[in-house]
Image (tube, rainbow, N blue to C red):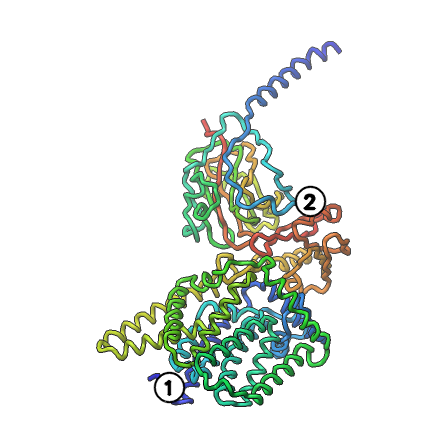
Amino acid sequence: MKIFVSCVSPIVAALLVATAAMAQDKVPLKTQLPKPLFVGTPVPLNVPNLEPPLKGKRADFMVPAGTVLLSKGKKVTASDDSPVTGTLDLVTDGDKAGDEGSWVELGPGKQWVQIDLAKKATIYAVLVWHYHSQARVYRDVVAQVSDDPNFKSGVTTIFNNDFKNEVGAGAGKDQNYVETYQGKLIDAKGAQGRYVRLYSNGNTTNKLNDYIEVEVWGKPAA
Amino acid sequence: MASGFARSLWLRWVLFLFVAFLGLAVRLPKLGERPMHTDEAINGYIVGQLLAGEPFRYDPQDRHGPALSALALPLARMQGAKSFSDLTESELRLCPVIAGTVTILLFGAAVEMFGFLPCFVAALLFAFGPLSVYYDRYFIHETLFCAATFGLILSGWRAAERRSLVNAAIAGACAALMLASKETAVLHFFALMAAAVVFWLWSRPEARARVWTRILLTGGGTFLALSALLYTWFGENWRALPALLTATPHLLSRAAGQGHGKPLWYFGQLLVSGRSGGVLIALACLGFFAVMKRRDPSAYRFLAIYFVLIAAIYSLIPYKTPWLALNLWLPIALFAGGAISLLWQAATSHALVRIAIPAFGVLAILVGTSIAHDTRQRVFLQPADENNPYAYAHTTDDILGLPTEISEFAQRDGISNPRIAVIASDPWPLPWYLRHFSQVGFWQPGRQPDQADFYITSTDIAEQYQAQFKDFRPDFFGERPGVLILLWLPAPK
């Protein structure tokens, strides 16, 4: 028994120290939220298989210390070269207000935007604001990370609520959600890659695809 | 040229028939593509009830008059519809398309009142203008109401001018058609009667003493008989008559707004919108003020008084919807036509006629192009878009995917005849979109629905049915901009 205790104790101690160190390394992700454009949550949903609405501000999302905003001002490309409204640079310009002129609107049906982070990074969170001046749900939202700009190889899917597999990234199991001023926070779980691609397939108001802002948080690869 | 056409009755009608034909051709393409607005869905449901052999039951709380259904029913039957589920968007919308085409044609009958060129221009504006084309493809009462109003003005004027009993009877029939379309006809009756009184007092004082008893009796008798015939659904529902008399308190309460309250200038703002709106309203103003400046007792003067009254009434009532602007568009088109006629006269009588005529042609092309742009944009490219000022609280395209998704999932799960339960305080326009399914039930929130394969709920009440939905996966659908509903699909096993 004594031998067992003497063997296990250092391991437990080491684990506790490591956990404490890891916990100390985690910090809340701090992003600036825009002003809400519609009052209250219009859809008080608390039902199975559906993302419950945020009551007040979202709980802190912990990311490793040193996590920075990687996407600000980075180059954006898209499946639609001629957006219906706005320009692609609006996706990473830092303006999340949601007022007229703060979003880019891609054509109808399945579309994607892609952010080039300029170099490989470890990604911990992606925040997406599609549109938040009315209650809308964007269809078939898929977020992927890859080092391949064509997303043909080494693709990590970090979010997928396309349960009918319309996008072709496989049937997703994530939940539908209603857009709000707080944006959608996607836990990227440390996925690595230089490019972040986001798909959508119209929304509940029209067939178009809007992006006010996308924030990619992580650490650049050493 | 204009006087030649005016003199030759045959040529005139060929020309107006041609414009009406063009108007029809503009109104028919893609007639069924725009999603059904809630009001269209309700009107479609009523036609479905009539197809099933039920009589029209007038309800002042919930329905307008029976005229639209009475005309849509034979049209639907002619196209092969036997039940509600057989009906299609384009079958129903054919009724207002025809009413709109008739309105264009009526300008040909207005030449004696307003002159050839003003009527021809007004017919063109009605045939191609975005507002009239848009709502002539909308299965609501307004287009029919507008046609009947124009018919009443034309036949009423002729009855008075010629002391014609036939025209008096037509006027009575048009008035009955107006009332059987919308109860708000009384506002137009008031404006028309007030305009007639003011017109006679101002313009024809020598006619004050004349009493046309026979004309009034003929017109009034036709009006009462036809109104009773339509409202009672050809004698099947006599309760409709006392119900019609009790409609006033309900209409007054609705006039306060009921969620549709808008500012005084709403219709002005709507009519000047787009590339062409400003120019057309400027032309109409020019025509209006030219009429008011002349002090001759013309039909235009009567129209101007009527327009001022009806525009004031519609603007002062807080309850406003964009299709009501169609009632203003009719006199506006005639005033704009009058202005064009004046400009044409000025241009052709001027010494520099060789310069004026091409300049006139260029202006016509510019205005025509801007009208074509607005009509294309609002009617065909963005008919249900929330940025389209005519698409008011419109059903979104997204809802079109709902019945398809139910069918797909029913097929996936081997359900041949899916049971669908809808729980919502206001389910419209869902009855229209679920009409092809034979087992559909509607429940008010708080009620326990029957066991179903698919559930549809409004988002605010879904939480009450947590236990029932535990084996279901929800999918959002947009009903209107900013209004979501949930379709609960059987979760994969």
Quick check: B425 left or right of B483?
A: right
Residue sitting at 67 percent across and 48 percent down?
B473
Residue B61 rendering spot, x and y as whole percentages? 67, 66
Report the mark closest to the observer, 1 or 2. 1
Residue sitting at 62 percent across and 59 percent down?
B404
Choose top left, top right, bottom left or bottom right for residue B72: bottom right
- Which amino acid lies under the numbered mark 1 shown in the image of this protein? Phe
- Which amino acid lies under the numbered mark 2 shown in the image of this protein? Val
Residue A1 rendering spot, x and y as whole percentages? 75, 11
Mark 2 is surrounded, within 10 Å at the Cα level, by few (under 14), some (14 to 19) or many (20 or more) other residues, namely some
Disc on res. A47: 2
Quick check: B369 left or right of B359?
A: right
Disc on res. B5: 1
Q: Nearer the viewer, residue B450 or A196?
A: B450
**Residue B368 appears in the rendering:** no
Q: Is residue A52 above or below residue B211?
A: above
Q: Nearer the viewer, residue B117 or B72?
A: B117
Residue B265 rendering spot, x and y as whole percentages? 47, 60
Q: Secondary structure at mark 2?
A: loop
Q: CA distance from mark 1 to mark 2?
A: 71 Å
Residue B163 rendering spot, x and y as whole percentages? 51, 89
Q: Is residue A56 above or below residue B490?
A: above
Q: Secondary structure at mark 1?
A: helix
Residue sitting at 54 percent across and 78 percent down?
B148
Q: The numbered mark 2 sits on a residue in which chain?
A: A
- Number of marks in picture: 2
The reply to whether dot 1 and dot 2 touch (C-beta < 8 Å) is no
Choose top left, top right, bottom left or bottom right for residue B402: bottom right
